[in-house]
Image: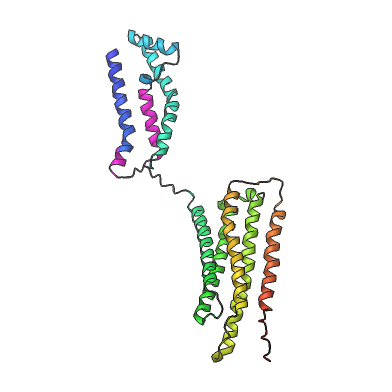
Amino acid sequence: KMAQASSARTVREREALTIAMLPTRRLARGRRSTRSPFLVLTALAAAAAALGPAFLPAPGAAARQSGAEVAAGTAVGEAGQARGWAEAGARTPLAASALLPLLISTPAIADTGDFGDIPGALVAYGHYLSLVLWSVCLTVERLTIKPGMTEEEESRVAVADAVYHVSGLLISVTGFLRVTQYGKGWDFYQHEPIFWLKLTLLAIAGAASFFITAIVVKRALARKDAGAAGLAPMSEKLAARMRSIINAELLAIGSIPLTASLMARGVGYAEWLPWQAGAAPAALALGGLGFKYVKEALDWREDEPEPSR
């Protein structure tokens, strides 16, 4: 009976080791396994269960008594052997948890067919890409605007400004989806002051862009009305004003990633903060500054040259 028990135990050990090594062999052959990652953990647990009695000490006198009875070959010993395997199985989670860091630190070798939160990932990607596009458009405008621009350069500014507003719309839509569906949830963001600071910076950048847009549209209409006579070149004063506003926009946009990083970590979170208090500065910045810059652009007048004496 001892020889039979030893032989059966050896077979079980070999089977468990074969199962545990199966994912590694598949990875070495360059083929992805279609089994779940939990199967790998199960295989490791089976190996630990098979090797457990050989490497783990018996928990108490009951296990030692079971070993003695098995050695004696009695019926009670066979029952003790069964109890020993049950105790080894009970110790399996401990052995498996010791092997879990090794499993986590290795590359993924399984494909369960569950692609996770793909819509949320796409929304986040669209949000980040729109912010990058926003910055690129502003940079193009900043480098192009100068006194006496050619018609081609003014057309480039107009295209960059149009793409800027499209990307701003995408930022708003994807940001709304992240707040309400794919992010931490509205219950978190409404009590996060840095979230509202981020929205205020976005509102400032958006409102400031109204001046650039109004000037671009105003000059395009004036060029159309002038016809063959052409439009007067952009003055130094107007170009300087447009560049200074774009500099402020770039500063606001450059601060947004910092606020987003702090916001995601819950810095400054205040459960008592009502969302109305957080939204008020952003609404005032968008409405108040937007009205100011549009009015300034529509009322813009070049300085009249002094009459020569």
User: Which residue lies at the image location 54% right of the left edge and 70% below the top edge?
Assistant: 142
Q: Is residue 305 left or right of residue 56?
A: right
Question: In percent of the image, x 51 and y 81: which residue is there?
Answer: 150
Q: Tell me if 81 is positioned left or right of 153 in this view.
A: left
Range of the magenta residues?
25-51
Q: How many marks?
A: 0
x and y percentages locating residue 207 in the rendered image: 64, 67
Residue 24 within the magenta-colored segment of the rendering = no
Screen quadrant of the N terminus:
top left
Placement of 147 over or under 277, stated as above or below: below
In the rendered view, does 43 fall on the left or right side of 217? left
Quadrant of res 204: bottom right
Q: Say whether residue 187 is visible.
A: yes
Q: Is residue 184 visible?
A: no
Instruction: Tell me what residue is drawn at x 42 percent, y 13 percent.
Output: 63
Residue 43 coordinates in the image, percent (x, y): 37, 32
Q: How are the colours assigned in the image?
A: rainbow
Magenta-highlighted stretch: main secondary structure? helix
Which of the 4 quarters of the picture holds residue 99?
top left
The one of 61 and 309 positioned closer to us in this rendering: 309
